Amino acid sequence: MRARLPDRADVVRRDGVRVAFEVFGQGEPALLLIPASPITHARSWKGIVPTLARRFTVITTDGRGTGRSDRPHAPERYAPAEVTADLLTVLDAADIGQAVLVAHCHAVPWALCLAADHPERVAGLVAIDPAVAVAPPHPHTVEPDRRWADQVDAPSGWAMRNRHFWRQDGGYREWIEFFFGQQLPEPHSTKQYEDTVGWALDTDAEAMIAEREGRAAPAGSEAEALCRRVRCPVRVLHGSDDRCQPVARGRRLAELTGGDLVVLEGAGHLPHGRDPVKVTRLITEFADRITGASMHATTWTRGPCRPARALYLSSPIGLGHARRDVAVAKELKRLRPELEIDWLAQHPVTTVLEAEGERIHPASQWLASESAHVASEAAGHDLHCFQALRRMDEILVANFMVFQEVVEEGRYDLVIGDEAWDVDYYWHENPELKRGQNVWLTDFVGYLPMPDGGEREAFLTTDYNAEMIEHIDRYPWIRDRAIFVGQDHDIVPDTFGGSLPAIRDWTTRHFSYSGYITGFTPPEPDEVAPLRSELGYRDDELVCVVAVGGSGVGQALIDKVAAAYPLAKKAVPELRMIVVTGPRIDPAAFPQRAGLELRGYVHRLYQHLCVCDLAIVQGGLTTTMELTAAKRPFLYFPLGHHFEQNFHVRHRLDRYGAGQYMDYATTDPDLIAAQITELAGKPVSYRDVETDGAARAAQLIAELI
Amino acid sequence: MRARYPDSDGLVVRDGVEIRYERYGRGWPAILLLPTWSIVHSRHWKMQVPYLARHFTVVCFDGRGSGGSGRPADASAYSDAAFASDALAVMDATGIDSAVLVSASCGGFWALRLCAEHPDRVLGSVFIAPTAPLVPPLAERRVQRFGEVFDNPVGWQLYNAHSWKTQYPEFVAFFVGRIFTEPHSTKQIEDAIGWALETDGETLTAADRGLECCNGAAVQRLAAQLACPVLVIHGTQDAVRSYAEGEALASCAGGVLVTLAGAGHFPHVRDPVQVNLLIKQFADRIRQ
């Protein structure tokens, strides 16, 4: 799912060619983002658009030859005059008089032409890794480019940049895969690589050849003269390890235009994809300078006069962590009564926080929905959560930027992130942005590949684990405290993959263990009957609660269990089944069945789970551990391809001797009915779950402030 | 030892009064740190000079009646026009055509006059805890009567021409205590008392009488004329000039108000980092 959808998506038609554009947000100045089409298109800006659009009007175009635009195959259709005319037409269509241009690679010459020839339309220019021939090209590109039109036998490397090779079967793809491997020299760039290769394959070899042959970009003294004609403010961003365009070109462009140069040391050719936080901040600062955004009225509170403040982030995917985070916060306030806690949170976590009277930071409204993304990634009873997390990249960076603004303005002493992946990742990637003490909580460590993902998935999970380990090794001061919600034996016996260490050993070295945090104390045996009665359950009925968590994924399981209900009811006449669809699934979406009760969000669902005679749930940790703590029999169905539910949670439940694992794919309603008949109301013998986890976690946090 | 010594210093003589100035660093725009009431001299900018001088040309001078400058005895020598003319003379002597003005407390008067009457020499003006009698004075100052004779003056009654003849040090101790309301300000208080004792009650009496021309109507008139960028910085715990004065000046002059919650009357001394960053940010905007 995208982090932000355009406010307007449209096309202009010029000279018979349709060029697609999108408009996001409002605010001065307008920013026109020009991709190096047709090898890439508007989606290449996905890491920076949502944040920029909160402040400015942002216009993206696909560029002729790719994306939602037409793909003419004649070189003359890609002449600079054509492309710049497209861009002016887009500005007209978007009703933008003047814009700051943000252009990448060979889109920079187009932007320079616009700035030189139509100064009234261009307020400024940000040139990223500019392909402007004001300095020599990389030597490794010279000979291949000279032989661009020649027949070359079995070319490899840069020599694959060849018109004949691109026309060969698979040639273009082979070139693209090589090319973007070169453009992303930064380790752990698998997602950016997959994205850029995918966008490049949105066009075809003929459009690419036509663009390359029609490009006619100025070189040498002609290029210098063009640069000198630019009068607007210019900022050049250039990766020091850019293998497409040498930094000397960026430096010379800045000199010729009187602009400033920001060298991104260690960055390759795609910093807006690989270092979106830094690039967003550099563009924002430049745009603010152009509008002369003046100082505004503010209040600065003297350090000693400030109340201690914490910003709490609760992983918003489902409701899993909301209850435990509220419990930790309450314990923390007991230890530090003066501490003010704000929550940066989104639905459905806010449902719990509001009910508990917690203070939700107003900037929470800017967060892109992680739950909706996860729901969009699920199909039936299947959620490949590792890939879903990878595909959540633009949502994570958008939400991180919201967080960073909040934490800078709010001057928080403490940030508590319960699986706040965005904060943990981007603070390690941009360590100078860290503010306050930082607590990281998680209940699992290590991405594990699903067996059917093969070598590729094992490579990817290992790569992600390696990046995390390198982050911690290089910047041990980013996480001031890391808390594992559980005990060491709850950690799977696996390694992080490849030659990486064993997960349990590594975690013990880098984490403190709080023990499990249920967020409530299960009722004593003599408290069960009164609570049952309070919740409206009779002693002579067998209560089966079916719950699918809070993420919006669960319809398929509900359908299957509902189908089992008549069968089970026949075998166990005293059965009463209550299906809780959660805050993100509408109970009205299910057909009514006689006797089957459907409910939406149930506040303090754990109380119902504590007194039920059987529960049927997914494999999420929170719900299964609530049932374990309350010693209730339950069936759990891990979501397909959900490594956390299938490995981490299952391992922990096995250790507690809790629950009946069920495989959704091979389970039919008859089997569910049989299990209900067998297990409902039967005693269990689980290992005890500690009840002091929240207090222990709070103590570990309180030591920091 | 100082953190930074001037690159040049000198004296200008105007109307027979020597004005001692210092110049630091280079870079555009120049920042002119104006004197305030003559009870302290230019060392009250000591926390700003080394930082700002790494980025800008910085000029400061001892106001007449303080530090290394002359101490005329006549009240008429301390008019705001005289201070403003001193500032122009120092700018001329240091070769500065135009500057960003930074003033504190009643130095705001001289800044207002410079902005209104010499707009070509002023790029912008930062007012720290300005004296801007556009609103009623602080309640605790209502007992203040400069010309009256009190038997046992206490508190603001010490702000008094007769007290200053015999009890100047007591007044200084009281007054400096009101400047720094923030806890743990011993060093700032010792500094300011030391600077204040470098001048004397008679000089200050003359200086104070010279200020009498500065009233709310004059401030309002001058502030309304300002065309340059204006930044007002005012602490909410200012016990000398009320926070409401800063608010009123910012509003009247169309400037930006930065509120320093918990700060007293001399935040540039007590919260120098924040004030330095604000001045730098303001000057950077002008540079752009």
Image: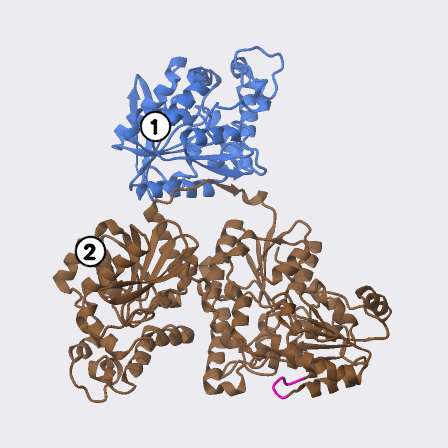
Chain colours: A brown, B blue
Q: Which residue is mark 2?
A: A256
Classify A294 as above or below A663: above
- Tell me where residue A525 sits by quadrant: bottom right
Residue A198 location, x and y as percent?
37, 76
Whether discs 2 and 1 lie on one chain: the answer is no
Residue A416, x across and y down, in percent: 59, 60
Magenta residues: mostly which secondary structure?
loop
Disc 2 element: helix
Q: Residue at x 68, y 57 (%)?
A: A355
**Circle 1: element type:** helix
Q: Which residues are magenta?
A: A662-666
Q: Report the amino acid beneath label 2.
A: Leu
Residue closer to the observer: A396 or B185: A396
Q: Quadrant of the N terminus of chain B?
A: top left
Does A649 appear above or below B129? Answer: below
Q: Chain of mark 1?
A: B
Q: Residue at x 38, y 22 (%)?
A: B64
Q: Position of residue A122 (x, y in %)?
A: 26, 52
Q: Nearer the viewer, residue A576 or B63?
A: A576
Front in this rendered view, residue B244 or B166? B244
Instruction: Look at mark 1 in the image and give the residue it sits on.
Output: B115
- Mark 1, other Cα within 10 Å: few <14 / some 14–19 / many ≥20: many
Describe residue A277's horizontal placement relative to residue A147 as left or right: right
Among the 4 quarters of the image, the one containing residue B10 = top left
